[in-house]
Image: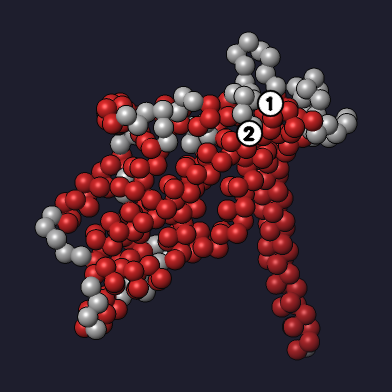
Amino acid sequence: MTDAKLVSFSDDLNPPRERALILSVLIHAALIIASIVMLYPLLWMLSGSVKDQNEIFQSASLIPSSLDFSAYVRGWMGAQVTFGTFVWNSVVIAVLSVIGNVVSCSLAAYAFSRLRFWGRDFWFALMLGTLMLPYHVTLIPQYILFLKLGWVKTMLPLVVPKFLAVDAFFIFLMVQFFRGIPRELDEAAMMDGCSPWRIYWKIMLPLSLPVLATAAIFSFIWTWDDFFGPLIYLSDINTYTVQLGLRSFVDSTGSSDWSSLFAMSSISLIPVFLIFLFFQRLLIDGIATAGLKR
Protein backbone atom coordinates (compact mmCIF):
# COMPACT_ATOMS: atom_id res chain seq x y z
CA MET A 1 0.00 0.00 0.00
CA THR A 2 2.83 2.36 0.87
CA ASP A 3 4.57 1.84 -2.47
CA ALA A 4 1.31 2.39 -4.30
CA LYS A 5 0.76 5.64 -2.46
CA LEU A 6 4.30 6.82 -3.33
CA VAL A 7 3.76 6.01 -6.99
CA SER A 8 0.44 7.84 -6.98
CA PHE A 9 2.01 10.84 -5.24
CA SER A 10 4.87 11.00 -7.78
CA ASP A 11 2.37 10.78 -10.63
CA ASP A 12 0.53 13.76 -9.19
CA LEU A 13 3.77 15.78 -9.31
CA ASN A 14 4.52 14.98 -12.95
CA PRO A 15 1.90 17.23 -14.58
CA PRO A 16 3.20 20.43 -12.89
CA ARG A 17 6.74 19.51 -13.86
CA GLU A 18 5.70 18.82 -17.43
CA ARG A 19 3.84 22.13 -17.60
CA ALA A 20 6.89 23.93 -16.22
CA LEU A 21 9.11 22.22 -18.80
CA ILE A 22 6.76 23.10 -21.65
CA LEU A 23 6.54 26.71 -20.44
CA SER A 24 10.34 26.93 -20.24
CA VAL A 25 10.68 25.59 -23.78
CA LEU A 26 8.12 28.06 -25.10
CA ILE A 27 9.84 30.98 -23.35
CA HIS A 28 13.26 30.04 -24.71
CA ALA A 29 11.83 29.56 -28.19
CA ALA A 30 10.22 33.00 -28.06
CA LEU A 31 13.50 34.53 -26.87
CA ILE A 32 15.42 32.84 -29.68
CA ILE A 33 12.95 34.09 -32.29
CA ALA A 34 13.10 37.62 -30.84
CA SER A 35 16.92 37.49 -30.88
CA ILE A 36 16.93 36.43 -34.53
CA VAL A 37 14.57 39.28 -35.42
CA MET A 38 16.76 41.79 -33.59
CA LEU A 39 20.02 40.46 -35.02
CA TYR A 40 18.76 40.17 -38.60
CA PRO A 41 19.57 43.82 -39.57
CA LEU A 42 23.10 43.41 -38.21
CA LEU A 43 23.59 40.11 -40.00
CA TRP A 44 22.15 41.61 -43.19
CA MET A 45 24.65 44.47 -42.95
CA LEU A 46 27.55 42.04 -42.49
CA SER A 47 26.28 40.01 -45.43
CA GLY A 48 25.88 43.14 -47.57
CA SER A 49 29.49 44.12 -46.93
CA VAL A 50 30.69 41.05 -48.89
CA LYS A 51 28.01 41.15 -51.58
CA ASP A 52 28.18 42.68 -55.01
CA GLN A 53 26.79 46.21 -55.17
CA ASN A 54 23.85 45.14 -57.35
CA GLU A 55 22.97 42.13 -55.20
CA ILE A 56 22.44 43.98 -51.92
CA PHE A 57 18.88 45.18 -52.51
CA GLN A 58 17.84 42.44 -54.91
CA SER A 59 17.72 39.71 -52.27
CA ALA A 60 16.96 39.62 -48.57
CA SER A 61 18.99 36.45 -48.15
CA LEU A 62 21.90 36.51 -45.74
CA ILE A 63 23.94 34.18 -47.94
CA PRO A 64 25.76 36.02 -50.76
CA SER A 65 26.11 34.37 -54.13
CA SER A 66 29.85 35.08 -54.00
CA LEU A 67 32.19 36.61 -51.46
CA ASP A 68 33.60 40.00 -52.45
CA PHE A 69 35.85 41.72 -49.88
CA SER A 70 36.81 44.60 -52.15
CA ALA A 71 34.28 46.82 -50.37
CA TYR A 72 36.55 46.86 -47.31
CA VAL A 73 39.45 48.13 -49.41
CA ARG A 74 37.31 50.72 -51.20
CA GLY A 75 35.75 51.87 -47.95
CA TRP A 76 39.07 52.19 -46.14
CA MET A 77 40.81 54.05 -48.96
CA GLY A 78 37.86 55.54 -50.86
CA ALA A 79 37.49 58.98 -49.24
CA GLN A 80 39.80 61.99 -49.47
CA VAL A 81 41.51 60.59 -46.37
CA THR A 82 41.67 57.00 -45.20
CA PHE A 83 38.96 55.67 -42.92
CA GLY A 84 41.70 55.13 -40.35
CA THR A 85 41.80 58.92 -39.89
CA PHE A 86 38.13 58.89 -38.88
CA VAL A 87 38.75 56.00 -36.50
CA TRP A 88 41.70 57.80 -34.92
CA ASN A 89 39.70 61.00 -34.44
CA SER A 90 36.87 59.07 -32.80
CA VAL A 91 39.30 57.25 -30.53
CA VAL A 92 40.92 60.52 -29.41
CA ILE A 93 37.59 62.19 -28.70
CA ALA A 94 36.14 59.11 -26.98
CA VAL A 95 39.18 58.48 -24.78
CA LEU A 96 39.44 62.12 -23.70
CA SER A 97 35.69 62.16 -23.02
CA VAL A 98 36.00 59.05 -20.87
CA ILE A 99 38.85 60.55 -18.86
CA GLY A 100 37.04 63.85 -18.45
CA ASN A 101 33.74 62.28 -17.40
CA VAL A 102 35.28 59.84 -14.93
CA VAL A 103 37.48 62.44 -13.25
CA SER A 104 35.11 65.42 -13.16
CA CYS A 105 31.91 63.50 -12.42
CA SER A 106 33.54 61.47 -9.65
CA LEU A 107 34.82 64.68 -8.03
CA ALA A 108 31.37 66.27 -8.22
CA ALA A 109 29.72 63.11 -6.89
CA TYR A 110 32.21 62.93 -4.01
CA ALA A 111 31.39 66.52 -3.07
CA PHE A 112 27.63 65.91 -3.18
CA SER A 113 27.78 62.64 -1.25
CA ARG A 114 30.54 63.25 1.32
CA LEU A 115 31.24 66.96 1.82
CA ARG A 116 29.04 69.46 3.62
CA PHE A 117 28.70 72.90 2.07
CA TRP A 118 26.07 75.62 1.82
CA GLY A 119 23.20 74.82 -0.52
CA ARG A 120 24.33 71.28 -1.25
CA ASP A 121 20.81 69.87 -1.59
CA PHE A 122 19.72 72.80 -3.74
CA TRP A 123 22.64 72.44 -6.14
CA PHE A 124 22.14 68.69 -6.28
CA ALA A 125 18.45 69.15 -7.17
CA LEU A 126 19.40 71.76 -9.76
CA MET A 127 21.92 69.35 -11.24
CA LEU A 128 19.26 66.63 -11.47
CA GLY A 129 16.96 69.13 -13.18
CA THR A 130 19.39 69.37 -16.08
CA LEU A 131 18.59 65.72 -16.88
CA MET A 132 15.19 66.89 -18.13
CA LEU A 133 16.67 69.41 -20.56
CA PRO A 134 16.98 68.10 -24.13
CA TYR A 135 20.35 68.60 -25.78
CA HIS A 136 18.78 70.78 -28.47
CA VAL A 137 17.64 73.34 -25.87
CA THR A 138 21.21 74.26 -24.96
CA LEU A 139 22.65 73.76 -28.44
CA ILE A 140 22.40 77.37 -29.66
CA PRO A 141 23.80 79.02 -26.48
CA GLN A 142 26.66 76.52 -26.43
CA TYR A 143 27.41 77.09 -30.12
CA ILE A 144 27.50 80.86 -29.62
CA LEU A 145 29.83 80.44 -26.64
CA PHE A 146 32.21 78.14 -28.51
CA LEU A 147 32.07 80.40 -31.57
CA LYS A 148 33.18 83.39 -29.48
CA LEU A 149 35.96 81.28 -27.96
CA GLY A 150 37.13 80.32 -31.46
CA TRP A 151 36.63 76.60 -30.82
CA VAL A 152 34.26 75.89 -33.71
CA LYS A 153 35.81 73.63 -36.40
CA THR A 154 37.95 71.99 -33.70
CA MET A 155 37.49 69.05 -31.34
CA LEU A 156 37.52 71.26 -28.25
CA PRO A 157 33.70 71.68 -27.97
CA LEU A 158 33.38 67.89 -27.95
CA VAL A 159 36.07 67.29 -25.32
CA VAL A 160 36.49 70.25 -22.95
CA PRO A 161 32.92 70.18 -21.50
CA LYS A 162 33.52 66.59 -20.40
CA PHE A 163 36.16 67.86 -17.95
CA LEU A 164 33.57 70.20 -16.38
CA ALA A 165 31.15 67.52 -15.10
CA VAL A 166 28.35 68.29 -17.56
CA ASP A 167 26.86 64.76 -17.59
CA ALA A 168 24.42 64.78 -14.69
CA PHE A 169 23.52 61.13 -15.23
CA PHE A 170 27.01 59.96 -14.30
CA ILE A 171 27.12 62.28 -11.28
CA PHE A 172 23.81 60.91 -10.02
CA LEU A 173 24.97 57.33 -10.59
CA MET A 174 28.20 57.89 -8.67
CA VAL A 175 26.45 59.75 -5.84
CA GLN A 176 24.18 56.77 -5.27
CA PHE A 177 27.19 54.45 -5.20
CA PHE A 178 29.28 56.68 -2.92
CA ARG A 179 26.41 56.91 -0.44
CA GLY A 180 26.55 53.14 -0.07
CA ILE A 181 30.16 53.23 1.16
CA PRO A 182 30.28 53.37 5.00
CA ARG A 183 31.15 56.78 6.38
CA GLU A 184 33.17 55.09 9.11
CA LEU A 185 35.95 54.71 6.56
CA ASP A 186 36.07 58.49 6.08
CA GLU A 187 36.08 59.11 9.83
CA ALA A 188 38.87 56.60 10.42
CA ALA A 189 40.92 58.18 7.62
CA MET A 190 40.37 61.67 9.03
CA MET A 191 41.55 60.50 12.45
CA ASP A 192 44.74 59.32 10.75
CA GLY A 193 45.19 62.81 9.27
CA CYS A 194 43.88 62.27 5.75
CA SER A 195 42.51 65.28 3.89
CA PRO A 196 39.32 65.08 1.79
CA TRP A 197 41.47 64.86 -1.34
CA ARG A 198 43.38 61.91 0.06
CA ILE A 199 40.17 60.18 1.14
CA TYR A 200 38.80 60.64 -2.37
CA TRP A 201 41.95 59.27 -3.99
CA LYS A 202 42.88 56.47 -1.60
CA ILE A 203 39.48 55.25 -0.38
CA MET A 204 36.59 56.31 -2.59
CA LEU A 205 38.09 55.61 -6.01
CA PRO A 206 39.46 52.11 -5.26
CA LEU A 207 36.11 51.08 -3.75
CA SER A 208 34.14 52.56 -6.67
CA LEU A 209 35.71 50.67 -9.55
CA PRO A 210 32.39 49.15 -10.79
CA VAL A 211 30.56 52.48 -11.05
CA LEU A 212 33.61 54.20 -12.56
CA ALA A 213 33.84 51.45 -15.17
CA THR A 214 30.12 51.83 -15.88
CA ALA A 215 30.52 55.56 -16.44
CA ALA A 216 33.57 54.97 -18.64
CA ILE A 217 31.80 52.36 -20.79
CA PHE A 218 28.66 54.42 -21.31
CA SER A 219 30.71 57.54 -21.99
CA PHE A 220 32.81 55.75 -24.61
CA ILE A 221 29.80 54.23 -26.38
CA TRP A 222 27.78 57.46 -26.39
CA THR A 223 30.73 59.49 -27.64
CA TRP A 224 31.67 56.93 -30.28
CA ASP A 225 28.09 56.82 -31.61
CA ASP A 226 27.53 60.57 -31.45
CA PHE A 227 26.67 62.06 -34.83
CA PHE A 228 24.97 65.35 -34.08
CA GLY A 229 27.77 66.94 -32.05
CA PRO A 230 30.55 66.35 -34.59
CA LEU A 231 28.18 67.38 -37.39
CA ILE A 232 27.67 70.78 -35.72
CA TYR A 233 31.26 71.59 -34.78
CA LEU A 234 33.47 69.77 -37.31
CA SER A 235 33.72 70.89 -40.92
CA ASP A 236 37.21 69.76 -41.97
CA ILE A 237 37.29 66.19 -43.27
CA ASN A 238 40.62 65.64 -41.49
CA THR A 239 38.80 66.04 -38.16
CA TYR A 240 35.75 63.93 -39.03
CA THR A 241 34.75 61.14 -36.68
CA VAL A 242 33.63 57.67 -37.72
CA GLN A 243 29.97 58.65 -37.86
CA LEU A 244 30.65 61.60 -40.17
CA GLY A 245 32.95 59.40 -42.23
CA LEU A 246 30.17 56.87 -42.73
CA ARG A 247 27.87 59.66 -43.87
CA SER A 248 30.32 60.49 -46.67
CA PHE A 249 29.51 57.16 -48.36
CA VAL A 250 25.88 58.23 -48.87
CA ASP A 251 25.30 60.37 -51.96
CA SER A 252 22.05 62.27 -52.37
CA THR A 253 22.25 61.76 -56.15
CA GLY A 254 21.71 58.02 -55.74
CA SER A 255 25.24 56.79 -56.50
CA SER A 256 25.99 55.65 -52.96
CA ASP A 257 28.53 52.89 -52.37
CA TRP A 258 26.38 50.75 -50.09
CA SER A 259 28.73 47.79 -49.83
CA SER A 260 31.57 50.07 -48.66
CA LEU A 261 29.21 51.74 -46.21
CA PHE A 262 28.23 48.37 -44.75
CA ALA A 263 31.86 47.28 -44.62
CA MET A 264 33.01 50.35 -42.70
CA SER A 265 29.93 50.21 -40.48
CA SER A 266 30.92 46.66 -39.55
CA ILE A 267 34.42 47.83 -38.67
CA SER A 268 33.06 50.73 -36.60
CA LEU A 269 31.17 48.26 -34.40
CA ILE A 270 34.31 46.42 -33.34
CA PRO A 271 35.50 48.86 -30.60
CA VAL A 272 32.05 49.03 -28.99
CA PHE A 273 31.71 45.25 -29.12
CA LEU A 274 35.13 44.71 -27.54
CA ILE A 275 34.49 47.27 -24.81
CA PHE A 276 31.23 45.60 -23.83
CA LEU A 277 32.70 42.08 -24.15
CA PHE A 278 35.61 42.64 -21.78
CA PHE A 279 33.94 44.98 -19.28
CA GLN A 280 30.36 43.72 -19.14
CA ARG A 281 30.82 42.28 -15.63
CA LEU A 282 31.95 45.64 -14.27
CA LEU A 283 29.10 47.30 -16.15
CA ILE A 284 26.49 45.01 -14.58
CA ASP A 285 28.04 45.32 -11.10
CA GLY A 286 28.14 49.11 -11.34
CA ILE A 287 24.47 49.41 -12.31
CA ALA A 288 23.26 46.72 -9.89
CA THR A 289 25.03 48.14 -6.83
CA ALA A 290 24.66 51.86 -7.53
CA GLY A 291 21.68 52.21 -5.21
CA LEU A 292 22.48 49.53 -2.60
CA LYS A 293 23.65 50.13 0.93
CA ARG A 294 26.66 48.22 2.13
Image position, residue 119 (x, y; %): 13, 55
Residues marked 1 and 2 touching at CB (< 8 Å): yes
Residue at 62%, 56% (x, y): give it.
277
Image position, residue 262 (x, y; %): 69, 31
Q: Residues within 10 Å of mark 2 (few under 14, many from 20)?
A: many
Q: Say which amino acid is labelled 1.
A: Gly
Residue, disc 1: 78
Q: Say which amino acid is labelled 2.
A: Phe
Q: Residues within 10 Å of mark 1 (few under 14, many from 20)?
A: some
**Residue 180 visible somewhere in the drawing:** no
Cα–Cα span, label 1 and label 2: 8 Å
Left or right of residue 95, residue 182 in this image: left
Left or right of residue 86, residue 116 in this image: left
Q: Residue furthest top?
A: 253
Image position, residue 105 (x, y; %): 33, 54
* Quadrant of residue 68 within the rendered picture: top right
119 w.r.t. 68: above or below: below
The N terminus - image quarter: bottom right
Residue, disc 2: 83
Residue at 25%, 47% (x, y): give it.
127
